[in-house]
Amino acid sequence: MNTSDTAPAGRKAAFGFIFASALLNAVSFGVTIPVLPALIKEFAGGDTASAAEWQMMFGAVWGLMQFVFGPILGVLSDRIGRRPVLLISFLGLAFDFLFLVFAPSLMWLFVARIVNGMTAASFSTANAYVADVTPPEQRARYFGFMGASFGFGFLIGPVLGGLLAGPFMESLVGDFAIRLPFAVAGALALLNFLYGLFVLPESLPPEKRSARFDWRRANPVGSLQFLREQGRLVGLATVGFLFQIAHNVLPAIFVLYTGHRYGWDIQTISLTMFLTGGLGILMQTLAVGPIVRRLGERGALLIGCAGAALGFLAYGLAPTGIAYLAAAPVFALSNLLAPGLQGLMSRRVGPEVQGRLQGANQSLSGIATIIGPFLFGGSFAYALRHPALSAWPGLPILIASALMFIALGVAWRYGRNDAPSPAAGPPP
């Protein structure tokens, strides 16, 4: 196969692989979500507070690896091509999940999370691949397909994980059932690697590659300088940063929180993730467009912030599992936040710096992914260990709600619908 195949057949194979890889990767990640905290708790001797602290460290180190290696893999793919970076990442991901199958202790799980964070950072390379093989006017459409593939995979993954670790499989394989989802995730990632090895063409021909590996471009902190150069973005970037931090509360504690407060098992947790994820997808596909057209991007942003603030408040105070589920439609409104925010931010800079804007947003997201697990995992463990707070296991979710009420105020102040000014020109 020609490694830089740009013929229609090559592009068709490339699109098929990229969309399939997004689906398989999301399924493989989703399969482990309801199970990994249970495995951590098992290693922690059944103590929920200790499990929360370990989950906090796992989440933070995963976010740190994403933050550091995302730009590195992106710049490396500019130098050597997209195909080898994607294939190495998929193979590493397969070995990481299979490593979790046999991990004998919490420390080995910690090592596995480091490897997982490094290899999972290749998602930006997949985006670059799509950009390589599509004309500019079609990129948004194909990025949408890719996001839909990832969203669908992430929807069905937790359900599959719950089934694999459920009573039926436990009756067949015994105690290995809690590790079975990791074996399936590893097999899916390995299948993804083999599929790409034989099907995926290179998208970046040698003449378009970087002449050398540029460490300055690989610096994840450097892209934040862009926000200082474009002062009109600071308020909106603050909204996005607060939302990214708050949004980490559910990945950090959801499984442990609902198990502790409502007595939910892995299957109930998986089904709840499916239902709430489905609400989010419905909101994204059916409501975002009409609401943005009717109320504008500022209106969508404000509704999204309010939905997140009120939804987190209800989640944190819900005394029963039924009450928690009843709050899900309110929280689903938070899906309006990102489209409104991205639209407003993109209006405030010219087309020549849109890439730098996305890079800066990605860096902020990475920092939030490091802060979130410490803030929410730590406060959850603290609440469980201190008698004065033991009646408030939802404390971390209430903190997330407070962050979103602050974000709502900032969005109201800085979220005007406007176009870029002449000052928002090319970078110096």
Image: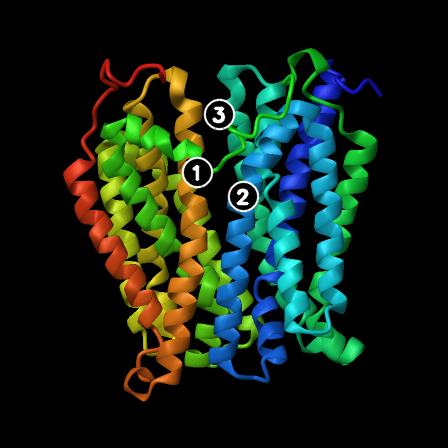
Q: Which residue type carries mark 2?
A: Val
Q: Can residue 265 be seen in the rendering of this structure?
A: yes
Q: Which residue type carries mark 1?
A: Val
- The answer to whether residue 164 is above or below residue 355 is below
How far across and how far down the image is residue 39, in percent?
A: 63, 73
Disc nearer the start of the sequence (3/2): 2
Q: Which residue type carries mark 3?
A: Ala
> Which residue is under mark 1?
221
Distance between mark 3 and mark 2 Cα atoms = 26 Å
Disc nearer the start of the sequence (3/1): 3
- The answer to whether residue 312 is above or below residue 211 is below
**Can you tell which mark lies on residue 68?**
2
SS for callout 3: helix
SS for callout 2: helix
Q: Nearer the viewer, residue 174 or 395?
A: 395
Of badges 3 and 1, the one in the foreground is: 1
Q: Quadrant of the N terminus?
A: top right
Q: Quadrant of the C terminus?
A: top left
Figure quadrant of residue 295: top left
Q: Can residue 285 be seen in the rendering of this structure?
A: no
Q: Residues within 10 Å of mark 3 (few under 14, many from 20)?
A: some
Residue at 51% in and 44% down:
67
